[in-house]
Image (cartoon, rainbow, N blue to C red):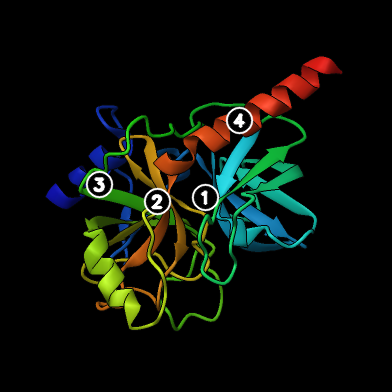
Amino acid sequence: MKILALILLLICGHKTCASSTQERIVGGVELPIHLTPWLASIVVHGNYSCTSALITSQWLVTAGHCVHYPDSYSVRAGSTFTDEGGQRRDVVSVILHPDLNLRTLENDIALLKIGKPFSLGANIQVVKLPGLNILPRTLWVAGWGYQDATDSESEPRLRGTMVEVIDLRRCQRLYSHLHRPITDDMVCAAAAGRDHCYGDSGAPLVHRGISYGIVSFAHGCADPHFPGVYTRLANYVTWIFNVLESDWKMNVAY
């Protein structure tokens, strides 16, 4: 019960949330959407592909590698499921970070604009962007990805788990064995038997309603030698605001 109470505090801060989660294996819990109402699943050709987070009623943030290929994307918010419930919207614009490197996954971030804004409510809310480049020690990550590295299909139910920030220099040393660069624009986080997995890409790394990172990559799932790697969101807030401001000015002009 103490663990569950801590999970609810990390997600909701001082708000009161219903404690209806169910313990699951591989270090995670199954969640109702109202505990992570900023999440939206990304679907392409009817299949779930990645997770995203609402930053306004009409804009979402995700990992750049999730949407780098020109295609017809849609997003669903307000539902625990990826194929039913909540509200579904078509993506009308994909803005990749101009310095996205698909080989190293540096600057792994993208913005999605939907044609019709989501109607916000108890199950659909926006996540806050970080104001300072200071990381809490313990954070929460949730998405619709695999339950473990051996799964053959993406899990249809929303799950989440707690992770702890790993020292960046330690993370750099670990990933140097794989010749993977870990930069100051990244965050490393993990815990024993807990991690994001395949299909969770784009999911936010959250503490008390503020997103500090975006699921980018890892080596396997919950590998004790290689923590999960996230795009450090604080380093991209200015870019995000510039994109939204340019879009607003364009709409006003027309």
> Which residue is painted at 27% across and 67% down in the image?
171
Q: CA distance from mark 1 to mark 2?
A: 7 Å
Q: In which quarter of the view is residue 175 placed? A: bottom left
Where residue 31 is drawn, which disc sits there? 2
- Residue 105 visible in rendering: yes
Q: CA distance from mark 2 to mark 3?
A: 11 Å
Q: CA distance from mark 4 to mark 2?
A: 34 Å
Q: Is label 3 or label 1 in front?
A: 3
- Residues at discs 4 and 3 in contact (Cβ within 8 Å): no
> Which residue is painted at 56% across and 36% down in the image?
240
Residue wearing tag 1? 80
Helix, strand or loop status at disc 1: loop
Q: Is label 4 or label 3 in front?
A: 4
Q: CA distance from mark 4 to mark 1?
A: 32 Å
Q: Residue furthest left?
A: 2
Q: Is label 2 or label 3 in front?
A: 3
Identify whether 100 is placed above or below 127.
below
Residue wearing tag 3? 7
